[in-house]
Image (cartoon, rainbow, N blue to C red):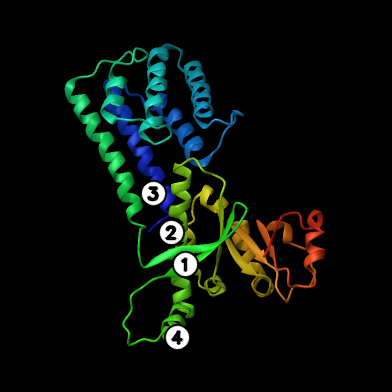
Amino acid sequence: MDCIFEEYIKFVDNFLVNYYKLLLGSRYEKRLVKPFIDKYIDVRYYNKYVVNEPNFTQRLNKELNNIAKEVIVENPEKIEKVKNVFALFSYVLFIDGCTKYSDLNSLLKTLYTDSHITLKYEEQTKKDMNTLVREFINKKVQFFKLFNTNEFFIRGKKYDNVYIVNLGQNCNLSKLYSDYAVEKAYNSPLVIENRIYLTILMVSSKVLSEVIALNFKNNYIIDFPVSLLTKSKKILRFLKALDNDLLRSKIHLRFKYCDFKFYRKEILGLINQDYSVCLELDETYDMNFDHLFLFSYILVNKKYKYYDIIINSKEDVKTEIISL
């Protein structure tokens, strides 16, 4: 599977295009609609914004209002069409879960009678709209069911808004195998590599569900097997699951300092490709501050003698430090 965040964004984008094509009919013009959709996705799913407004709905409305002004300047003869596009977006906020509503039928009825929208709808259009919206909502539910499993789960420890997580398993295996044999197989090098792919998918699903709930606060740290650094084809498949700007800022790949010393070129290569990487200092740490600023987080355990030195050297480290 490719990056699930990207797949979901394509799904939303496709719905919005069909939403406008259906409601605007022959009045639909891509150049008038696309700027609104692009801005909506940037703000709604990537938390990008220019307007400084803590309330999400008000911020989004202000951003879309700015887009409306820009599109009108570029298309002064299309003022009425642009106003309709802008007005129709207020209902997207409900349909896409930004704002709560009590009843879908009432919501759509309000849309059809909205005095700010100078459009008339045939009964067939209303029926098609009802189908389009319900299918969109149902497919969103089905999408997340793909990642619901009783066999595997995400577990970990929280440090403020940062979670250090790994994949737990709850598989019902034959009693012929001892717990030791199961654990040994589960932690074999090949299984560890394959586990990280499932971990990325499940954590990506969690990040996406939080974003849909307008929660952009949390970050996740996952261990990344160094064995993958030498497998060029396999690592591309794994990294493809993180091929999204928001995921790369929310999911951080953890390496230990001993691995960084050995795979410095490969790990710095990941950073140069805009993947977020964090570094856990271990018993091999030699008080070298070079490169530490490149990592999204530096993890340091209180058991090491250099712990106080690192904690008191935040200005030199120049990145966020997490005490383990």
Q: Which amino acid is tagged 1?
A: Leu
Mark 3 = which residue? 7
Name the residue tied to disc 1: 167
Q: Which residue is identified by label 4?
A: 180
- Which mark is first along the chain, 3 or 2? 3
Residue at coordinates 33% horizontally, 16% vertically from top-left? 114
Crowding near the residue tagged with mark 3, few <14, some 14–19, many ≥20 C-alpha atoms within 10 Å: few
Indicate which disc, 4 or 3, sits on the residue closer to the N terminus. 3
Q: Is residue 241 visible?
A: no
Disc 4 is placed on an element classified as helix
**Residue lying at 50% horizontally and 37% vertically, measured from the top left:** 42
Q: CA distance from mark 4 to mark 2?
A: 26 Å
Residue type of the residue flagged with mark 2: Met
Split into 4 quadrants, where in the image is the N terminus? bottom left
CB-based contact (under 8 Å), mark 4 and mark 2:
no
Disc 3 residue type? Glu
Give the x, y percent position of residue 73: 51, 16
Horizontal and vertical percent for residue 230?
54, 73
Q: Residue at x 37, y 16 (%)?
A: 81
Which is more N-terminal, label 1 or label 2? 1
Relative depth, front residue between 165 and 24: 165
For label 3, the SS is helix
Q: In this rendering, does residue 124 appear at all?
A: yes
- Asked if labels 1 and 2 touch by Cβ distance under 8 angstroms, the answer is yes
The residue nearer to you, when weighing 25 against 297, is: 297
Measured along the vertical axis of the image, is residue 203 above or below residue 64?
Answer: below
Tag 3 or tag 1, which sits nearer the N-term? 3
| Mark 2 or 3, closer to the camera | 2
Badge 1 or badge 4: first in the primary sequence? 1
The circle on residue 202 is: 2
Q: Nearer the viewer, mark 4 or mark 2?
A: 4
